[in-house]
Amino acid sequence: MQQMDGRSAFSSFSSRDLIAIGFRHQRTIVVTFLAVLLGAAIAALSTPPDYTATTKFLIERSRMDPVVSPGQDQAPTRSEVTEEELNSEVEILQSDSVMQQVVVAAGLNKHKHLLDYVLYWNQTPEQKIERTANHLKKELKVEAVKKSNLISVTYTNSDPNTAHKVLAVLDEAYLQKNLAVHHPKGEFEFFDQEAQSYQKNLADAETQLKVFSQQEGGVSPQMARDITLQKLNDFNATLQQTYADIASTEQRIDALEKQAGTTPQRITTQSSASDDASVLQNLKSTLMTLELKRTELLTKYQPTYPLVLEVDKEISDTKIQITTEESKPLKAETTDRNATYSWISEELAKAKADDSALKAKATSIQLIVAKYQSTAHELDQKGIQQQDLLRKVKTEEDNFLLYEHKREEARMTDALDQTRILNVAIAEQPGTPALPSNSRWLVFGLGAVLALAISAGAAFTLEYTNPSFRTPSEVLSELNIPVLAAVPHYTHAFAGNGNGNGYSNGNGNGNGHSVFVNHDATVEN
């Protein structure tokens, strides 16, 4: 016999071996397949048909409402719908209030189920509505369609009319909720009340301004204040000039007084010197008389006699007077009034008069300046009061016009709400589905595929868990022993010996083999 390598001859696993597994476990495969297929058939027959209804909402910017606020608004600009806005609308659509409204309107809370009698038999109607709303939220499939402004809503129910009714009620509830969220009620009444209030305030402010103008004689305090300030500036300039003139006049008076002190009032026009002839003649005549008297006394008395001595003394005094008169000649001078002194006197008198007049003028101008300052301050206060009144009128007018504009906007918004012109539109109305969304044949087909997979899995599981050897490849892979030969076994299992050890396994159907192995590397048959 030809020498062969048992490892290479029996190491491969062929499709025949795979089919052999099926034959070995055909009973298990058939029973499992039929059992699962029967269950799938029962499930397909017992599963009620489901009907799916669909509705779609279009989120758009066709209606541009102004922002409701007390400030001045700019013109609304049209913008694209953002992903955040779509997600917000999805959340509004799935809100608890919308779900509960749908449950009540569609009558879902009146449906009776087995669990209602077993677990929820003592629930209140409100709890039943909330539980049904939570269940409805899970059953609804709400999603924003990618790359669009659409929101798709699908609902599946065993009753096509119920599926249609739920989505129809959902459309209406969502539109009402969207209207309530984006356009709350009471805006027109609020702005109408505010507009009337500011209109009354405007009338009161205009009345106060009119009364104030009448009290002022129709003259604007600001204009009168400006005129008064102009005159005040003129009088201030005049007063400063008067002060300068007074200072200049006082300096001139000082200079004139100094000049008057050094200037003589009169000047000598003619001068001459001569003796006083009449005086000298009288003195000489007296001297002669005294000498004659002395001579006469000497004739009677001694020189020492007192009368003689007295006459001698008189004679001596007379001589001295004569000598004195002769030594001091008599001077004759002619004087006249000094013209410079007269001019200085006149200028000094005029300067003093001017100084008095300027001081009196300065005092008078000071009184006028003080009066104009008081008047200007009073007019300034009145001007501030008038500005406050004007500002109040302007503010009240702006507020009135603003709220008048807001009232019109709110009225237009209410009109649009009443006509259901919204930024949400129903792009697809829900219809009553005629065909079920699930198929019994599909359930049966899936059950058949599942039965085939389970039966095959059961066969392979039994094959894998069986510890006996069935093919030469299993012997080679598990024991790592060269296989000498493999003989199909049809009747009974046997074990041989001789040149090798024999192993066999069979089930009486010709599926077994008698395998002869040897521990040597090569064997000749």
Image (cartoon, rainbow, N blue to C red):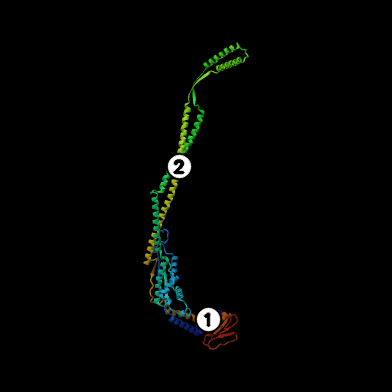
Q: Residue furthest top?
A: 299
Q: Is residue 241 visible?
A: no
Rendered residue at 44%/49% (across/down) = 381
Rendered residue at 46%/29% (across/down) = 343
Query: Earlier along the polypeptide chain: callout 1 or callout 2?
Result: 2
User: For the residues carrying marks 1 and 2, which lies nearer the camera in this image?
Assistant: 2
Residue, disc 2? 367
Above or below: residue 285 compared with residue 93 = above
Picture disc at residue 477? none
Q: Quadrant of residue 87?
A: bottom left
Give, as a three-letter code, the residue at label 1. Thr
Quarter of the figure with the N terminus = bottom right
Q: Picture coordinates of residue 251 (x, y %)?
A: 49, 34
Q: Which residue lies furthest to the bottom in this view?
A: 491
Q: Which residue lies furthest to the front in this view?
A: 300
Q: Picture coordinates of residue 290 (x, y %)?
A: 57, 14
Q: In which quarter of the image is residue 10?
A: bottom right
Q: Picture coordinates of residue 287 (x, y %)?
A: 56, 14
Real-space Cα distance between discs 1 and 2? 128 Å
Above or below: residue 405 compared with residue 114 = above
Residue, disc 1? 461
Tell me whether the residue at label 1 lies in contact with that at label 2, contact meaning CB atoms closer than 8 angstroms.
Answer: no
Q: Residues within 10 Å of mark 2 (few under 14, many from 20)?
A: few
Q: Is mark 1 on a helix, strand or loop?
A: helix
Q: Picture coordinates of residue 438 (x, y %)?
A: 42, 77
Q: What element carries label 2?
A: helix
Above or below: residue 15 compared with residue 428 = below
Left or right of 209 in this view: 482: right
In front: 208, or 196?
A: 208
In front: 253, or 510?
A: 253
